[in-house]
Amino acid sequence: MANFEAYQEYQRIEDFEEDSPPGEEEDLLVHVPEGLKDSWHHIKNLDNFFKRIYHFHQKNGFACMMLSEFFELIQFLFVVIFTTFLVNCVEYDVLFANRAVNHTGQGQNPLDRNKVTLPDAILPSEQCTERIQENSWLIFLLIMAAIFWLYRLVKVFCNVMSYWEIRQFYIKALKIRMDELCNFTWQEVQDRLISLQREQQMCIHKKELTELDIYHRILRFKNYMVAMINKSLLPVQLQLPLLGNVVFLTQGLKYNFELILFWGPGSLFQNKWNLHPKYKRNGNRLELAQQLSRVILLMGLANLLLCPFILVWQVLYAFFSYTEVIRREPGSLGARRWSLYGHLYLRHFNELDHELHGRLGRGYKPTSKYMNSFTSPVLTVLAKNFAFFSGSILAVLIALTVYDEDVLTVQHILTAITVLGVVITIARSFIPDEHMVWCPEQLLQCMLAHIHYMPDHWRGHANKSETRDEVAQLFQYKAVFILEELLSPIVTPFILIFHLRNKSLEIIDFFRNFTVDVVGVGDICSFAQMDIRRHGNPTWMSHGQTEASIYQQAENGKTELSLMHFTIKNPRWQPPQESSVFISHLKEKVHHDAQGGPSTQLLLSEAPLCTSLQFNGSGAAPDNLLASVLAHPVLTASGLQGRDHRFIPPSTAASAAASVLASLSTSQLPHTSRSRSHSLLNSSVQPETMYRSDRTIIDSMSNSDIRGNTLNSEFASAEMSLHAIYMHELHQQSSHPQRASGQWQNPVPMRDLHTNSGFQSQSGLGSSLSMPTTVHLGGWQEEEEENEDDQEINSGSTPKQGTGSSC
């Protein structure tokens, strides 16, 4: 992050929407429906208000939210009480039969006199209380737990009051009943919010709210975090012996980052929506950096002081949460999940949680297949032998148990059976399927279609262990996740004290250089504006349109990809002029490349085969589109004949993606709920298609069962996936032209297309194909239990030629 002083300082920018004139805000308050103006007119903290509205929708209403809050309190109370009981009120010598128990009572069966019962191992209440009173350290911990629980109780009570008001807002202002809430997508709720702003001014500084205004308020701090990850300012990367470069980011460390930067004592923001004025000036940056360094030091020392308490809680909570799961499914620790770092690294600017989770959920299977395609031959041999020996012993123990159940009374027999079962399950996880095919490049391309971001050095090196290790930072084992969370209370203080403090000056400069004041919204991260002129990258089709220096450019095309994602997900949004020009040029480039690409009829005819190759044979229309684009270059390169028995000329994924994108249409989709109301460009032509097309794909899809907002959302996701593939291919052409030789014929720069392509600017990037909808949170977790019988032809097994096929 060099040359930051050359960049302009904090500035105030006018929103491209018409703002209320200074001093005339009260003139906007003429029409306020009776009964609503007292509650929701002129809301002071719109950030919290919109966040609560969003969370209320995503968490399925008031009842579900309050039940979750209530059981969180009960869980904490249960863990504390149950742990205290186990430590002080159980006689373990009796429980483990280290001390004999003699029941002497009338009518007692002599055979049962030495039999240990559960009440025998529990101490009387008087003795239990005495033990607790004698342990001063335990009393101190219980007092701390009680204080924290009371704090949580007050917070829950406040949440009940605030979310009851949100419930009333949904019913009275938005006209959405609670029994119908689950039938509304977030975009439909958002549309009603925008309409309500016209009736009663929730925000008095603007006549109208836009989709981007709402996203900015909900994601104000998250956009800063995404930008700092993108510019490699956070998280701290550690060089550890044997492990190499390690990215350490846990929930506890992230909480400390947010506490220091956004809303804690001594943070950079003076309230929820304004950066403190002193951080907007360049003159005292060194003094401010020293002040921030002291805040980080104090926060690190506080974490060090609280480390024992947090560590005890982490261990107890992990024990109660995961022990039963591990006993039932030992292989679950070998399952993968998107890491916290992966969520921030792969997140677009202005991408809500449900949109991110849905996208990563769709990318879970291809990423799992890619990671599973790497195996160690040495570990495979060891695992096979461990499984054989453990299985042999387990088989004998099971046979003896079947022959005579008294074998189970032998000491540690059940323990041995359980341990052997766990060992066999873990060993089998290291044994690859010998029928898998080694196709890392195709799997990486399939990953890219969903995660949208991929460093340049991954391309062409998908079979390298270095690439696999970098993907593992984004897509970690669940066991690694649990271990990192357990170590977090110990590691977090040292990261804050010895690593983050060294970046104080860079953090101060980042917030000064990349904060803008948008009228009616407040201070936001300038990257969240998705302004191509300010933060575009020339190698990502922004050549001639951006004035950004290397320091100002977003990395990995995040500005351009975020702009496309937001426009597709919010088809009613009208971008500013610079963004409109970029989108117009992209459409022209797509239309030009589609003319030399494969026909849409050919891509559709290949869809069944491509779906079986790239996906899991779901047969859904959006999956067919993606599978055709991803597999078409492989099929044409192999010399397969077309349906007319003529050889198909080789083509790239970019040309195939361009052909599909150019064929997308809105008019052929039945039962669309809304259409784009604003033109992306000032053009007299108002067609219904994003690209001029022969509508082949949509005409074919119209014969299938395409119904509802959910499928429209899937088509929007597929459209964004196609854009990601296409834009990455163009980026490779621009930044590495030697790699594209022979693949791209007569490339035309985007800035020249408007003069020779004959393509007219058209309204609306998004179509009803791009219809956003609510995607269930945590959808990617539901895909962890992958069917082992699904076709795994592209999952790969081992790089060795002799152990499997290779693409």
Image (cartoon, grey):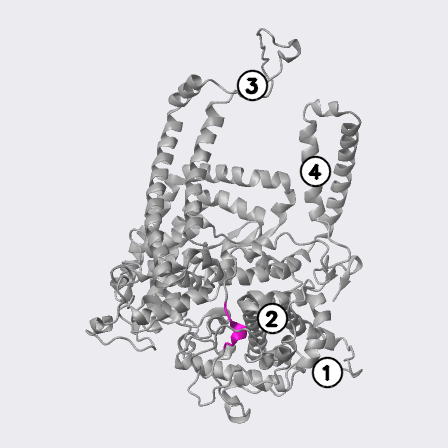
Give the CA distance from mark 2 to mark 3.
Answer: 66 Å
What is the crowding at mark 2: few (fewer than 14 residues within 10 Å), some, or many (at least 20)?
A: some
The first of marks 1 and 2 along the sequence is: 1
Q: Amino acid at mark 2?
A: Ile
Disc number at residue 93? 3
Instruction: Look at the image and tell me in which quarter the N terminus lies.
Output: bottom left
**Which residue has dot 4 on it?**
421
User: In this orientation, which residue lies closer to the viewer: 13 or 168?
Assistant: 168
Residue 330 is situated, as x and y percent measured from the top left of the image, at: 64, 42
Give yes or no for contact between labels 4 and 2 (Cβ–Cβ under 8 Å): no
Which residue shows up at 47% across the image and 31% down it?
83
- Element at badge 2? loop
Check if residue 750 falls in the magenta segment. no
Region rendered in magenta: 766-772
Residue 159 is situated, as x and y percent measured from the top left of the image, at: 35, 49
Which residue shows up at 67% across the image and 73% down it?
628
Q: Amino acid at mark 3?
A: Asp
